[in-house]
Image (spheres, rainbow, N blue to C red):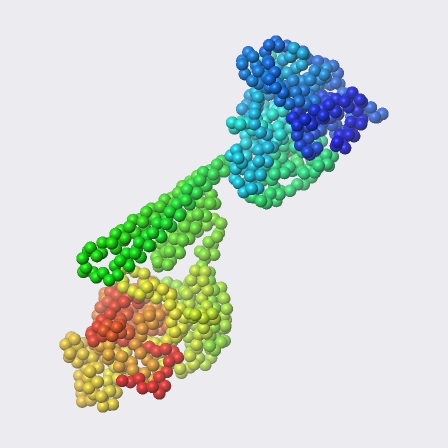
Amino acid sequence: MDDELRRILDTLDPDDRERVLDAVRASSSGVEATVDAFGASSPGLHATPVPSEDDVDTVQFSGSAESSRAGDGTLTIPPELEDRTEEVERSGPERYEVLDTLGEGGMGQVLRVRDTELNRTVAMKILRRKLLSRPGSLARFREEAQIAAQLQHPGIIPVHDIGRRPDGSVYFTMKEVKGSTLEEVIEDVHIALEEGRTRTATGVGFRRLIDLFHRVCETVAYAHHRGVVHRDLKPENIMVGGFGEVLVLDWGLAKVLGQEHAELDSSGDAQSLPPDARDSIRTERALDDSLKTRVGAIAGTPRWMAPEQARGQIDAIDSPSDVYALGGILYLILTGRTVYTTRDLQQLIDWVQKGEPFDDPREVQTKWLVPDELAEVALKALEHRPQDRYPTAAELAAEVGTWLDGARRRERALEVVQEARDLGPRIAELQHRATELRERAQVLLEGVRPGDPEERKLPAWEAEDLAQRAEAEAAQLALERVQGLRNALSHDPDNREAHAALADLFHAAHVRAEADGDGAEAKRVALELANHDRAGRYAHYLRGDGALTLLTDPPGATVTLYRFVERNRRLVPELEEELGTTPLVKVPLPMGSYLCVLRKDGHEEVKYPVLIERNLHWNGVPPGATEPLPIRLPKLGELEPDDCYVPAGWYWSGGRDPGVTTLPWKRVWGDALVVKRFHVTFGQYRDFLHALVDAGRTEEAERYQPHYAGGEPLFQRDGDRFVMTVDRDGDPVKPEFPACQIDHESCVAYAAWWAEQTGHAWRLPEELEFEKYARGVDGRPYATGHHLDPSWTIMKNSLDSPGWAPVDSHPLDVSVYGVRKTIGTIVERCHSIGGKWVGLRGGGWASNTRQCLAAAKKSMPVQQADDATGTRVVRKFSDAIGDAVMFP
């Protein structure tokens, strides 16, 4: 037995003590009952025990906040205990037939009865006959019936009638409701959440639980509007019916407000009431001061009562007192526990009275996310001072309703999100099927010549058609998936899951767009990704920050960083910052294309372009290696003035334009090169011919001399010398013009001669080598960047006269390494292809924009020569011929 209860019992006289014990004994049966041993306003004990192991929760304490005893220790009898038995009209014995007992308590019992006149089953609440002599008990019993009868609301059990039974006991009948208490529903929901389920076996989830609570708030709000404060709101007093009913029970402790000056006239006409009181609840007890609860009496359940209620401040108890109890219920819903958890009754009352601080619900419940909005609502409702809470349950209901509206929209949005996500596996399956079919078509076409009969091609065509249909269906479903997620946002604009799913899709689309080199699409998708990445998961991806590691041989080189920016449609390096001296390790850099200029005393200045790709680390680690390769710094004098040094490293090659023949777009490694700044000139080529003549190899000189297609030599002979005069059109042939009208064998012979003259293994470039020294490392289409204007070089539509021009003209046609004329003026011969064809790169004076692309592959027979094709020579930086004889 609770110590506080024992202390109070010890002070009572035998009769009063026995009545209290009757009430407590009755409550232990497990049936919820209302026990009023002394009457509602007694300074003794008012208990409403409920089935629970926690004594603090099972007793409604109605003791005086101040001592109610005389100085000699005897119990004072308040006026309301005087015998003032009210008369209630008796009903006939044949009206109700008792069917079953629903519950019993110290105040009386609740029966299931059949109304024989209306042929229906109802619940009958009976006041024990021995309490009839106590005016307070009978008055409160009648008031409970009058309040419930006048509160005509779906959330309040309707009272049908009131009267006396043949044995003299007083009763009122009401609708019988079957279901579970809100306490049981809360417990079931929390068990489900603990087990990882979103709903209970009966289909109640968290959002539904809040909806039930919202309906409780609306019911209490209605009572507040009618001038009634419940004073004993708790989960055990709230019934959830089997068909969705939510009912607030037990109005036995309700307080009727605003009745002190509202009196009925002799006719009982409500129009005689003040306008603001015409809709108020009117009870006999509320109009009789002698029957009201006296100041200092504590009535209610300590665990749920407001501080002013726990202090017995009767006049202070108003609608905010109910709001406090509702806040406690919401706290239980959010956390699974009550605001205060002590089992000590006196400590509990002390904490409630003083407003002892309690834990934020978001800190109590860590197994799942407690909505911030609801946590704030609960905390405001549980404020210690009444004026700091919501004024009535209506304001509280409005706040909860706002959250519910969002939760309902969110639930619908989540359904749509799931529908969109369910399309993912089907899309992936179709895409995989299309890939398999296209690969099958390629296999079937192997060995099939273009001119073969269509019968040999039909199986491959069928596979291609099926692949196309699968791709089309996958594309359609992908569009439906995006549209579905957008539709989810129409239900819930801030839905995290829909935004996250769209962010994932747009991230994948952005990766594809960048891989395809579709800059416009990449920009569009990046905006979509930034808009939907509400959680910031792709913020780092969108910034694209990477890092640079740079080592040099020898170390200690100063590094000046320039960033390539577009100016007048050309990519030009603009000073960014001084990075310090090498070695540099994982220096953070934003995504972009840069030029590092390396300087060290005693060494040549080196231009080293780097590409910081999205979130990647440029480290210069060669294929198959694990450590970065130091950039060799040529010593002063190691390079000739017209030598361009191309450091080793990775670069992008190939193309992605379906209208141009290119190598596959891929990242490749290139060793260090030395490239001649200019094409081989007529003057340099003539020196080669003269060297042959001087070596007694006049026939070879004649063989290698430039010829027109018909065999006519371009140079004239003056003895053993070759003289440049004019071409067929009468235009002068100048030494500074690029050498042309020479076939592949002649170009190879020139490179070998030049290698012998310099001691380095000069040769014709490989096509991939051309791409690097022309484009740099960032895969730009032209040496100038992503655009080409005919005024920057000599090409088709240039203002300059088409034809030859000095190799050092048009300085804008220059690569990042300083190599000139890779875009126009003359097409460069590269290595031979299979011995019969030679690869060509770059554009000439008659080339269009696409033909000038650095990645564009062209070819011509090895023996062919024309006036738009020339050559330049390259070598590996470390290569030297030594004593080897390279000259044929």
Viewed as shown, does residue 283 lie left or right of 491?
Answer: right
Left or right: residue 603 versus residue 230 is: left
In this view, 813 is above or below 322: below
The location of residue 151, given as percent across then percent down, is: 57, 21
Report the side of 307 relative to 67 (left or right): left
Q: Is residue 306 visible?
A: no
In the rendered view of the protein, which quadrant contains the C terminus? bottom left
**From the viewer's perspective, is residue 400 above or below residue 838?**
above
Q: Position of residue 490 (x, y in %)?
A: 42, 40
Query: Residue 850, position in %: x, y?
Result: 27, 63
Residue 35 figure quarter: top right
Looking at the picture, does residue 242 appear above or below residue 266?
Answer: below
Which is more toward the observer, 15 or 133?
15
Residue drawn at (44%, 40%) of the image = 415
User: As drawn, is 500 to the left or to the right of 281?
Assistant: left
**Residue depicted at x 39% and y 70%:** 669
User: Against 774, is 33 above or below?
Assistant: above
Q: How many marks?
A: 0
Residue drawn 37% across the image and 63% down it: 566
> How far from the left and from the top, in percent, is residue 560?
46, 70
Which of the 4 quarters of the picture holds residue 93?
top right
Closest to the observer: 886 or 543? 886
Q: Does residue 593 appear in this view? A: yes
Image quadrant where one finds the N terminus:
top right
The residue lying toward the viewer, choosing from 652 and 353, is: 652
Farthest right residue in view = 72
Residue at 71 percent of width and 29 percent of height = 61
